[in-house]
C-alpha cells in the first residue's frame, strides 16, 4: 500500500530533528456546497534540521518514531527566504501602482478645477 504524502508549511522548528507542519485542505459542505478550509498540524521528522519556519515541505507517512511523530520530511519545496523576496517584490509593485493611481487622480482634480 502506498504511503500518504502531504504538502504543508513549517510552523515551528524549535525541537531537535522535529518540525511542526501545518497542512491545509479545502472541503465542500455536503448540504450547502460551500468551500471551506481545514488545517491540521503534524509533527514530522527532520533528520538534518534543514527546515526553517515558513518553508514549504512535503511530508510522508512512516512508522511511529515517537509518541506523536508519524511523518517525515521528504523534500523542501521552497525556502522562507525565497517566499519573503517574492512577497516584498509584490508589495513594491502594489505601492508603485497606488502611487501612480493617486497621481492620476490628482491630475484629474487639477484639470477639473481649471475647466471651472
Image (cartoon, helix red, strand yellow):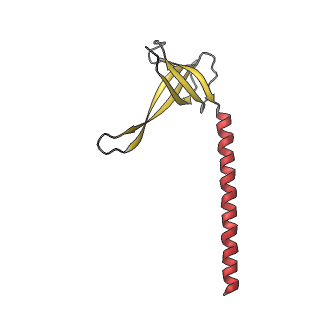
Which residue of the protein is positioned furthest toward the bottom in this rendering?
116
Q: Residue at x 69, y 62 (%)?
A: 99
State which quadrant residue 74 falls in. Answer: top right
Q: Where does residue 69 sit, x and y in percent of width and height?
A: 48, 18
Where 27 falls versus 42 (above or below)? below
State which quadrant residue 97 falls in. Answer: bottom right
Q: Residue at x 66, y 60 (%)?
A: 98
Q: Residue at x 60, y 15 (%)?
A: 47
Report how many numbered discs are placed on residues in the image: 0
Give the camera-side residue of 113 and 19.
113
Q: Where does residue 113 sit, x and y in percent of width and height?
A: 67, 83
Where 71 falls versus 110 (above or below)? above
Q: Where does residue 100 sit, x and y in percent of width and height?
A: 69, 63
Which residue of the protein is positioned furthest toward the front in this rendering?
1
Which residue of the protein is positioned furthest toward the left in this rendering?
31
| Image quarter hosting the C terminus | bottom right
| Image quarter hosting the N terminus | top left
State which quadrant residue 58 falls in. Answer: top right
Q: Where does residue 13 sit, x and y in percent of width and height?
A: 58, 26
Q: Residue at x 45, y 12 (%)?
A: 64
Amino acid at each position: 500500500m502506498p504511503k500518504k504524502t502531504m504538502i504543508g508549511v513549517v510552523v515551528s522548528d524549535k525541537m531537535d530533528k522535529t518540525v511542526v507542519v501545518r497542512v491545509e485542505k479545502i472541503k465542500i459542505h455536503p448540504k450547502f456546497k460551500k468551500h471551506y478550509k481545514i488545517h491540521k498540524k503534524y509533527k514530522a521528522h527532520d533528520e538534518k534540521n534543514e527546515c526553517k519556519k515558513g518553508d514549504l515541505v512535503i511530508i510522508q507517512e512512516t512508522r511511529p518514531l515517537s509518541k506523536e511523530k508519524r511523518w517525515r520530511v521528504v523534500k523542501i519545496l521552497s525556502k522562507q527566504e525565497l517566499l519573503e523576496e517574492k512577497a516584498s517584490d509584490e508589495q513594491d509593485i502594489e505601492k508603485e501602482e497606488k502611487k501612480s493611481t493617486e497621481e492620476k487622480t490628482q491630475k484629474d482634480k487639477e484639470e477639473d478645477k481649471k475647466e471651472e
